[in-house]
Image (spheres, coloured by chain):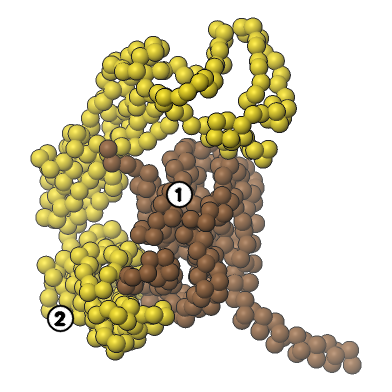
Chain colours: A yellow, B brown
Amino acid sequence: LAAELKLPPRKTRAINIRQLRDAQLADFKKNKIPATATDGSVSWIRIDNVPVMGRLMVITRHQAMASSYDCNTCMCPLVFDGSVQVDPGNTHLLPTWYGYLSCFGEYEDCNYNRQWYQETSVATWSSGDTAVATVDGSSPGRIEGIGAGSTIISASYSDCGAYYPPFSGQYSCTCEQIKYSNPSSGGEVAVQKPQFVKVIYSQCGTHTCPSGYNNTQENYIPYQVLDVDQNPIPIAGLEVNETLFNASSSCPIPVPGGSGAKTDATGSFADRVWLCCQQSWSCGASWDQSFTVNSYPVLVLANGLTGSKNHIQTACQNGQGTCPNVYPVP
Amino acid sequence: MSGFILALLLLAVQPVTLGSAAQFPSRSRNLALDRKLDTKVPVFNTQGQSFAKSFLNLVCGYKLPAALEYVDKDAVQRPLSLTVRKAPLRDVIRALVAKLPEYRVTFVDGIVDVYSPQARRDPNNLLNTVIPAFSVNYESLNGASTELANLLRAQTTPGVGLIGDVLESPDEPKITLNLRNKPVREILCAIIAANGSAVWAAVVPPERLSDPRVQLWAVYPLGYSFCDFLFARLHKMFMVAQ
């Protein structure tokens, strides 16, 4: 702000902020604080050690603390605050299945900005109950389901929690205090025997694609959720989610995002699949999908086959289309 | 005689009312939403949770069709301190949104819509992309969202195929919509309002709302666990690899 304010130590004075605002000069990027600015709506960006010509600003402080903003002049280092989080917070596995956890540590800079950083590879991992799940030290964060139950997978590590010198004008700092992590949050792992989703039938229809694309066949596949003994689960409200991967196609396609649904009163849900290609392309695609029910991975049953994922192949040509082929694969 | 005239008037008025309801199916849902928003909340406390977490708790707890058009790091990570006593739910949400200066909220068209005016003005924000024609007929929530994503992709990234793989519940409400020249965010709000029990949220940080290669939004039916999925996804957006 374009104002000169000189105060003896420990003295205060009322300031008309509106007058200051209206009298302000633009900064070096010709920005001014707008009249409509509200508390917290203006962001100040600090840029350290940037070569400049001339003098930009002088801040003079006489004993009383006007601001703690620039107390630490050693390159504004990030300090570890001890908070550690294991992600995902909850994991559901089947026996012999594996997954990966990540470890994030929270850091703060001298402007009090906080950020989580991944520290998976430097963390020390441990399992609360190795009869339920183990965590692999040689491949950090890799967990494996052993037997039914639940346990906590923990991560810990240490980093610098304060730097020296805190008040000098030096631009390199020495770690003054190693901070050890607090007990990590998250990392709950539950292991359960596998349930199943069974393809009830597969039915083809026509999908109307946007203008400029071939209309294509659309496959409708209802599924039934089965329990560990392969009996239908007659309970509504199970949450089914899918993950899509290994997509390949003769026409360029993005990897689609997975979606979720709740099962109906008979424990069933449905999957619809289609592909729209531009008319100049030879149409066709394949991809894999895996399912979770209430976050637990499930096996896929179809045509007497069992697999950990479903493979989908679809093809279309000149708007005629071929009905997608769906089968489980290991 | 006057009774006969009254009966004639009722007969004359009834088809108009029915026709009007058929044309604007979201009207009754607006009333339902208004009733929910008038609910008196004895005590609301953020308990140090972030804006996004607190908002989703309200949305899922009271089953409010809702939108989070813009999600920044502050909204997901900064702990909030707010207590509101004996206030209508609408005022609780207003008080919550007021804690973040760049956010606004509206309660129109059958949806609680949280947005950033600045993001709405940003021409690079793909959620502002106008879709010339959006039409779905008896479509599920995920299906309608996927169709919209495909239309946006066709418009912003010519030269890619459009793939659909949609999970749906056999008994979930189906949506029929015909919209012309509406931005993506308004179409999403219309989808949510028509469904009546869902939420959509931007699932990329603000700087990536202009990236046509990423999934910009997600839709979830309302329910505590789906809200947990959504919040976990938002939280993960701002964790970075070192």
SS class, disc 2: loop
Q: Quadrant of the C terminus of chain B?
A: top left
Label 1 crowd bin: few (<14), some (14–19), many (20+), radius 10 Å: some
Residue A2 percent across, percent down from the top left:
65, 24
Q: Nearer the viewer, residue A296 or A244?
A: A244
The structure residue drawn at horizontal position 67% and vertical position 80%, both measured from the top left corner, is B20
Chain assignment, label 2: A
Amino acid on which the number 1 mark rests in the picture? Pro
> Which residue is located at x 76 percent, y 89 percent?
B12
Q: Is residue A12 left or right of residue B79?
A: right
Query: A136 left or right of B52?
Result: left
Q: Please tell me which residue is depicted at 18% across the width and 43% down the height of the picture.
A: A141
How dense is the environment of label 2, judged by Cα within 10 Å: few (below 14), some, or many (20 and up)? few
Asked if disc 2 and disc 1 are in contact, CB closer than 8 Å, the reply is no
Residue B130 lies, in percent from the top left, at 52, 67
Q: Is residue A30 visible?
A: yes
* Figure quadrant of residue A180: top left
Residue that numbered label 1 is attached to: B206
- Asked whether the residues under marks 2 and 1 belong to the same chain, the reply is no
User: Where residue A169 sits: x, y (%)?
Assistant: 39, 13
Question: Which residue is more in the foreground, A283 or A194?
Answer: A283
- Quadrant in the picture for the N terminus of chain B: bottom right
Q: Is residue B130 left or right of residue A264?
A: right
Q: Amino acid at mark 2?
A: Asn
Work out whether A168 lies above or below B124: above
At x 27%, y 78%, the residue is A281
Question: Is B212 rendered above or below residue A40?
Answer: below
Camera sees residue A221: no
